[in-house]
Amino acid sequence: MVQQVTKGIKITVKTNFEGTFRKDTGSRFAFSYHINIENQSKDSVQLTSRFWTIKDSLSPTEIVQGEGVIGKKPVLKPGESHNYQSGCLLNSPFGAMSGHYNMISFNSTRKFKVRIPVFKLSAPFALN
């Protein structure tokens, strides 16, 4: 588990290896990640978009960006949290993800970025 607080928004990430499967000419490694976004600030905020950097030890770095998270743009009042789960496929048993959420404060209409800490993706069978 990793955690990061940016401007009063706490991000907690837990990962899990889901398994290996064959695709085309090689193996693919499936990982899930569970994210909790907690508003520890005094302002109501809304998550508007996301930006991910996905690193795979056998592939070029991939950038993923888009609106909201899993089809939602959650609004968080002070003290509230939003949880969601998603996943990614890698060509190797090792990788990492990091990124940021773009958010807006309702009190000041200020847009800001909330850092998502680097989290490792590793298949347990591949660890020494």
Image: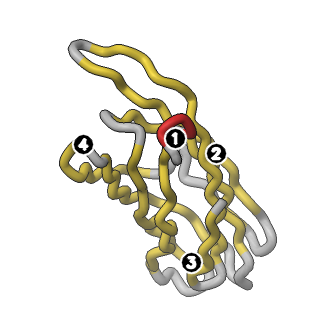
Verify CB contact (< 8 Å) between mark 1 and mark 3: no
**Residue depicted at x 50% and y 66%:** 116
Q: Residue furthest right?
A: 79
Secondary element at image label 3: strand
Residue 46 in percent (x, y) is at 57, 65
Amino acid at pointer 4: Leu
Image height check: is 18 above or below 34?
above
**Residue 124 appears left or right of 36:** left
For disc 1, the neighbor class at 10 Å (few under 14, some 14 to 19, many from 20) is few
Measured in 3D between alpha carbons, the distance from the residue under mark 1 to the one under mark 4, in whole angstroms, is 27 Å
Verify CB contact (< 8 Å) between mark 1 and mark 2: yes
Secondary element at image label 4: loop
Q: Which residue is mark 2?
A: 84
Mark 1 or mark 4: name the one nearer the start of the chain. Answer: 4
Verify CB contact (< 8 Å) between mark 1 and mark 4: no
Verify CB contact (< 8 Å) between mark 3 and mark 4: no
Instruction: Tell me, for residue 58, which label it has, or none.
Output: 4
Mark 2 or mark 4: name the one nearer the start of the chain. Answer: 4
Which image quadrant: the N terminus?
bottom right
Q: Residue furthest front?
A: 128
Foreground residue among 73 and 58: 58
**Residue depicted at x 31% and y 15%:** 23
